[in-house]
Amino acid sequence: MLNRLLHLRLAVIGHDLLMVWLAWVVSFYIRYSIWPLSPEVTWWSLEIALVLLVQGLVSLYFDMYRGLWRFASIPDLMNIMKSAVIGTLAIAAMFFLLNRLSGMPRSVIVMYPVLLVLFWGIPRISYRLWKDKHFGLSADSIPRVLLVGAGNIADLFIRNAVTNRSCHVMTIVDDDNKYHGTQLRGVKIQRGLNRLTELVAQYDIDMVIITKQNPDAGLIRTVVDALAEGDCQIRIAPDPDDYDSNLANVNDLQPITVEDLLGREKVELEWTKVADFVRNKSVLVTGGGGSIGAELCRQLARFGVSQLTIVDHSEFNLYAIDSELNGGATLIHSHLGDITNQAQLFYLFKKVKPDVVFHAAAYKHVPLLENHLCEAYLNNVIGTQTVADCCHQFKVSKMVLISTDKAVNPHSVMGATKRLAEKYCQYLNSHSTTDFVTVRFGNVLGSAGSVVPLFKKQIEQGGPVTVTDARMERYFMTIEEACQLILQGLIVDHEDGILVLDMGQPIKIKSLAKRMIALTGQSREIKIEYTGLRQGEKLFEELHYANEELKSTEVDKINLAKHNNAPTAQLIKHIEQGRSAAVNYQHRDLKRLLQKMIKEFKGNQLNVITAEQQVSEQNN
């Protein structure tokens, strides 16, 4: 291989020096042909030898012999022009010093670099065109690609696409005025992101690749929405650093993720105070095997807590997070348990003596819980009460309750029980040395049972993708960001209010479904079906009540909802009555109590109790 490469380089050097000789001689021939009394053209002389030496050194300086003819491009042509012009100036300077340019027509100095560029450039470009045709780069066997974004990444992508023959770049779209009417490596750059659908059809594009560095979510959504009705795949080109060690193949490009579509801006958070707060403390996380709980455990393990106690009633989930975190620097205690088991929790708190508790355990599937009122109440309300009471009894420094936007003006059993959990922690906060913090936020991407994994599964199965209502909107954030902000809540002064995470703008579920389908390039094959609202579902979620005063805190993306009506001791009596009704499966009584405790609960509009349950209760 090295010998072959050396032979190729020597062949290129020989060719280029031959072209230098030819350009020099032809320049004299042309000049003398129009001069009747001209001397004969000299085919070889000391002067020609000096020309070859000087031009050869200049060419070497401009790396003329490193480029491969197979991939000759505009930058190579620029090097040729630079080498020819600088070489001519150097030759002229040399002969001026030697003989004051005696016997050298000035027209030769002008014609020589022009001829040299032609003699050097034409063979290179011809060879590349022949090779491109030979390898079928324009054939239908490889994808036809449209790039969104001109610049360095597009330049690197085109060069590498030619190198590995993975695709044929047909055109580039960029609305920046500085690129208007220009080309990049022979590919036309044109404006018109709003014409993307038209251009895809015009060039018969198979794949659209975004070649802007760190593209924002707005650009990604614009591209995805424009192609939502077609069969064109969408990808993002890697950063320039990724080209150094490996030539990027179009087939290896990673698909756009839902997180890319969400595109929430990263916030610089103050981790020093959080780390100082939890360092060398005993921390307990309920529901530690779930989506939010597991990510909280991962982040806490990095902060140097003295021990991390994980509680979950799912054997598999507990095993998974325990296997992931055990063996690290943090001491891990994993406990299979039920948060409604007061004796078990009492024993656990007495054993591990937690300083901080994160309560993430909850039932959260809205339609399912509509027909499981008693189970939802026992887990979400009584479970929270049990955990909170243990925190109070064992003088835990701080307890963080993970709540949900569904607790605001709840239409569902799930929302009503989570709102009641919020109220109990608010009440206990004013009667305990423990600081009870409630953090409320919307949906997290990719959590178990959420819409994103469901859509992914339906898309993989070829559809249809089911959306309950075309008008439905939801707030979304990533699990990682949600947990980061939850941890920031440890150091925020909540003033007996509720911490509300800034979820940005709500997203239409219909749009989310369309975009997820568009990312697969199967928009024509996979359809969306509208199934109607399910029990307990709302069209639009809210993050705070109208009578809650919302204000910002010292942490960006964390707001404070200050409530006006503090819960009274009557709440405890009602919760205990609800416990009695739940353990005895008295659905009607429990439903009435829940509506009494949460007056804004809209459950009276829904069929919470099944017909069989109604008959059973009437018989009793």
Image (spheres, rainbow, N blue to C red):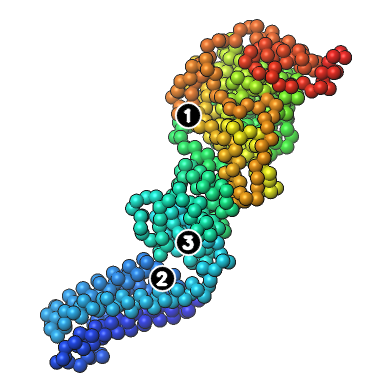
Q: Residue at x 32, y 77 (%)?
A: 118
Residue 36 placement, left or right of 422: left
The mark that comes first in sequence, 2 or 3, is 2
Q: Nearer the viewer, mark 1 or mark 2?
A: 2
Q: Nearer the viewer, mark 1 or mark 3?
A: 3
Callout 3, which amino acid?
Answer: Met
| Mark 3 residue crowding within 10 angstroms, few (<14) / some (14–19) / many (20+) | many
Res. 476 visible in picture: no
Q: Eyeballing the image, is 166 above or below 524?
A: below
Q: Nearer the viewer, mark 2 or mark 3?
A: 3
Q: Eyeballing the image, is 225 above or below 583?
A: below
The residue that label 3 is drawn on is: 170
* Mark carried by residue 72: 2
Residue 498 placement, left or right of 73: right
Total numbered circles: 3
* Mark carried by residue 557: 1
The mark that comes first in sequence, 1 or 3, is 3
Q: Secondary structure at mark 2?
A: loop
Res. 619 visible in picture: yes
Callout 1, which amino acid?
Answer: Lys
Give the alpha-carbon distance from disc 1 to disc 2, as whole Å: 51 Å
Give residue 239's position: percent from left, percent from top.
46, 52
Q: Residue at x 36, y 55 (%)?
A: 179
Q: Secondary structure at mark 3?
A: strand
